[in-house]
Image (cartoon, rainbow, N blue to C red):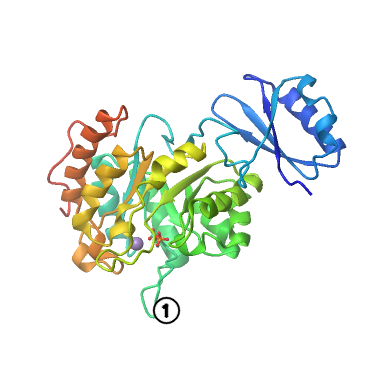
């Protein structure tokens, strides 16, 4: 059986009625459809045995521009389907001209810690607040996160600062709960190939930040995104967070080449996480600048009001002060590659807790 080998690309500006008409005709052939709303047009992925369907004269159907047979193993994630996808998180659009910076502590520890972090990163220009309530720790004895209470704290801090929130969801059974609190659902590196979880976030009605598994190839990563897309969720942001190599002096190795590569293979936006890629706050600045220069659509950076007291990943966390100065540097790099970073004009160099 040939599965999802075809994509119907609709003409720009096609209406809902024509779209439904085309879907019904596809369903009549015993095939199923997945609709993705791109920036300029809508495309319909056709799933099932398409051997006879290709003779249905599809290109003459109302609203249809053309039909494409996708040769890549990933289909809906492929650049052959769409030129670009922009994912809205709060007021920011990831995948547009702006390089969207998401920042905050590794883990939600307390209300005071989150509020201090959110205030500082927001003032420096971060558009999204990060903070894990559920932490996938290598050791079962390490701090595992505040779980439900952490989600509540994220909600309170979001209400006070207006910053949208990205937070990790680790299990299928908590997708609904996390989706009620998060603006962007993070699927961590360790769960990149947790297929039931990918399907569940695909149905969650929230955008998803899909981290690359620490030993995953680019193709496996895009196939993981395909699980989410084919479950009905078009809003996927890929996150390169370093892969495991033979080098022990850094936590992982940031695969910078994956950024332009993914942008060539896929229409999905891609962001970089230099914190988990390096494990060392002193390397976060240089690699953030490099990722923006390489075309990243955003960054995910760990910032803690007191890195020396962090319950998780303090050694890779920036202070509010170093984050604020990094943002200014990023603005210059972004401008050099025709992008921009939001840096408030009155960016404080002495933010609280710096
Ligand atoms: C995190 O973002 O805190 C995290 C656990 O990341 P990763 O899944 O990339 O290890
Ligand atoms: Mn972390």
Residue at 44% x, 55% y: name it: 167
Which residue is under mark 1?
Answer: 140
Is ligand 1 less than 8 Å from the beta carbon at label 1? no
Q: Is residue 162 visible?
A: no
Q: As rendered, which of 125 and 109 lies closer to the eye?
A: 125
Residue at 45% x, 65% y: name it: 134
Q: Residues within 10 Å of mark 1 (few under 14, many from 20)?
A: few
Q: Position of residue 254 (x, y in %)?
A: 33, 54
Q: As rendered, which of 213 and 121 lies closer to the eye?
A: 213
Q: As rendered, which of 331 and 76 lies closer to the eye?
A: 76
Name of the residue lying farthest toward the left:
350
Q: Quadrant of residue 293?
A: top left
Q: Is residue 205 rendered to the left or right of residue 148?
A: right
Q: Quadrant of residue 141?
A: bottom left
Q: Is residue 212 rendered to the left or right of residue 124?
A: right
Query: SS class of the residue under badge 1?
Result: loop
Q: Position of residue 186 (x, y in %)?
A: 47, 54
């Amino acid at each position: 059986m040939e599965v999802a080998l075809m994509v119907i690309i609709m003409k720009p500006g096609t209406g809902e009625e024509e779209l439904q008409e085309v879907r019904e005709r596809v369903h009549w052939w015993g095939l199923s459809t997945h609709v993705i709303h791109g920036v300029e047009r809508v495309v319909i992925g056709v799933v099932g045995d398409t051997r006879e369907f290709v003779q249905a004269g599809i290109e003459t159907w109302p609203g249809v521009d053309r039909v494409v047979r996708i040769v890549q193993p990933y289909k809906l994630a492929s650049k052959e389907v769409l030129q670009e996808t922009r994912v809205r998180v709060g007021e920011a659009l990831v995948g547009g001209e702006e390089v969207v910076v998401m920042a905050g502590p590794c883990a939600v520890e307390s209300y005071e810690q989150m509020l201090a972090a959110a205030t500082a990163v927001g003032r420096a220009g971060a558009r999204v607040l990060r903070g894990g309530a559920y932490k996938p720790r290598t050791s079962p004895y390490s701090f595992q996160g505040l779980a439900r209470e952490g989600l509540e704290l994220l909600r309170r801090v979001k209400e006070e600062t207006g910053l949208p929130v990205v937070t990790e969801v680790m299990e299928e059974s908590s997708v609904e709960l996390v989706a009620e609190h998060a603006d962007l659902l993070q699927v961590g590196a360790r769960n990149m190939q947790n297929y039931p979880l990918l399907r569940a976030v695909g149905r969650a009605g929230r955008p998803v930040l899909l981290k690359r598994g620490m030993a995953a190839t680019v193709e496996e990563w895009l196939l993981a995104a395909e699980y989410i897309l084919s479950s009905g969720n078009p809003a996927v942001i890929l996150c390169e967070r370093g892969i495991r190599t033979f080098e022990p002096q850094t936590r992982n190795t940031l695969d910078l080449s994956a950024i332009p590569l993914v942008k060539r293979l896929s229409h999905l936006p891609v962001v970089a996480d230099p914190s988990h890629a390096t494990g060392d706050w002193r390397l976060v600045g240089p690699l953030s600048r490099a990722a923006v220069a390489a075309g990243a659509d955003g960054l995910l950076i760990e910032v803690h009001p007191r890195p020396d007291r962090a319950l998780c990943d303090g050694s890779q966390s920036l202070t509010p002060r170093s984050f604020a100065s990094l943002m200014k540097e990023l603005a210059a790099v972004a401008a050099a590659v025709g992008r921009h970073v939001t840096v408030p004009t009155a960016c404080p160099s002495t933010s609280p807790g710096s």
